[in-house]
C-alpha cells in the first residue's frame, strides 16, 4: 500500500470515527429553539424547577444551576429570581438566590463598572432585606452586596448595618469592607 493510499485510508477512518460526533452535535444544535445554547436551556429548565417544585432540594439545585451559568443569565431570568427571592417559602432557597445575585454581578461586571442589570438586582435585594423575616437570609443579602459595583449597594449595606440582628450588622460591616477593598483594587490596579 502506498503512502497516498494509507493517507486516504486514515483520513476515511478519522472521518468515520468523527461522523457520529458531528451528527450528534449538529442534531443537538438543531434541537435548541431559536439557536438557544444548551446552557440557556438548562437555565430555563432550572427556572421552571425553581418556580414549580415543591421540594426544597430541587429548588436549591435549580438555584445552583443558574449560579453556575451566571455569565449568561438574562434579565428575564433575573426577574424570575427576584420573584422567588421574596416569595419562596424556604429561607435556604431565598439565601441561595441572594448569593446567586452576587455571582451574577461578579461575572457580568466590567471592571469597576456595574453589570447590565446590577441596579435591578440591588433594588430587589434592598426590598427583600426590608421584608425578610429570617436573619440568615438578611445576612446572605448583606454578604451578597459586597460583590456589587452599583452605588445603591452602599445604601443596601447601610440599611443592613442598622438591622435588628447583630449578625446581620456584622455581615454588613464585613461586606462593606470587602466591597471597598475590591473596588479600590479595581481602580488602582
Image: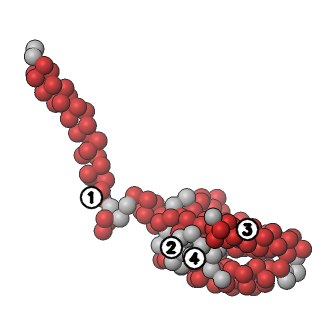
Relative to 16, say whether 85 is above or below.
below
Write down the residue under mark 4.
114
Of marks 3 and 1, the one in the foreground: 3
Q: Image quadrant of residue 173?
A: bottom right
Write down the residue under mark 3.
181
Whole-Å distance between the Cαs marked 1 and 4? 35 Å
Write down the residue under mark 1.
30
**Which secondary structure, mark 1?**
helix
Write down the residue under mark 2.
77
**Residue 128 image offset from top left, x and y in percent:** 70, 81
* Of the image marks 3 and 4, the number of the one nearer the N terminus: 4
Q: Image quadrant of residue 2?
A: top left
Of marks 2 and 4, the one in the foreground: 4
Crowd around label 4: few <14 · some 14–19 · many ≥20 (10 Å): some
> Residue at image x 23%, y 39%?
19
**Is residue 94 toward the left or the right of residue 36 in the image?**
right
* Of the image marks 1 and 2, the number of the one nearer the N terminus: 1
Q: Nearer the viewer, residue 189 or 4?
A: 189
* Of the image marks 1 and 4, the number of the one nearer the N terminus: 1
Whole-Å distance between the Cαs marked 3 and 4? 16 Å
**Which secondary structure, mark 2?**
helix
* Of the image marks 2 and 4, the number of the one nearer the N terminus: 2
**Is residue 116 toward the left or the right of residue 156 in the image?**
left
Crowd around label 2: few <14 · some 14–19 · many ≥20 (10 Å): some
Whole-Å distance between the Cαs marked 3 and 1? 46 Å
Of marks 3 and 4, the one in the foreground: 3
Amino acid at each position: 500500500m502506498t503512502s497516498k493510499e494509507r493517507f486516504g485510508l486514515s483520513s476515511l477512518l478519522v472521518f468515520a470515527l468523527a461522523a457520529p460526533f458531528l451528527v450528534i452535535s449538529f442534531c443537538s444544535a438543531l434541537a435548541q429553539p431559536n439557536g438557544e445554547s444548551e446552557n440557556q436551556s438548562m437555565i430555563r429548565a432550572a427556572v421552571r424547577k425553581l418556580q414549580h417544585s415543591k421540594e426544597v432540594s430541587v429548588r436549591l439545585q435549580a438555584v445552583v444551576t443558574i449560579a453556575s451559568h451566571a455569565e449568561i443569565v438574562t434579565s428575564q431570568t433575573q426577574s424570575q429570581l427576584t420573584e422567588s427571592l421574596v416569595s419562596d417559602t424556604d429561607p435556604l432557597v431565598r439565601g441561595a438566590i441572594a448569593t446567586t445575585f452576587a455571582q451574577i454581578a461578579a461575572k457580568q461586571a466590567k471592571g469597576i463598572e456595574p453589570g447590565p442589570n446590577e441596579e435591578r438586582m440591588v433594588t430587589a435585594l434592598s426590598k427583600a432585606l426590608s421584608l425578610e423575616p429570617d436573619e440568615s437570609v438578611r445576612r446572605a443579602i448583606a454578604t451578597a452586596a459586597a460583590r456589587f459595583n452599583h452605588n445603591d449597594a452602599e445604601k443596601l449595606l447601610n440599611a443592613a448595618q442598622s438591622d435588628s440582628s447583630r449578625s446581620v450588622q456584622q455581615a454588613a460591616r464585613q461586606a462593606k469592607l470587602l466591597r471597598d477593598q475590591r473596588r479600590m483594587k479595581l481602580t488602582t490596579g
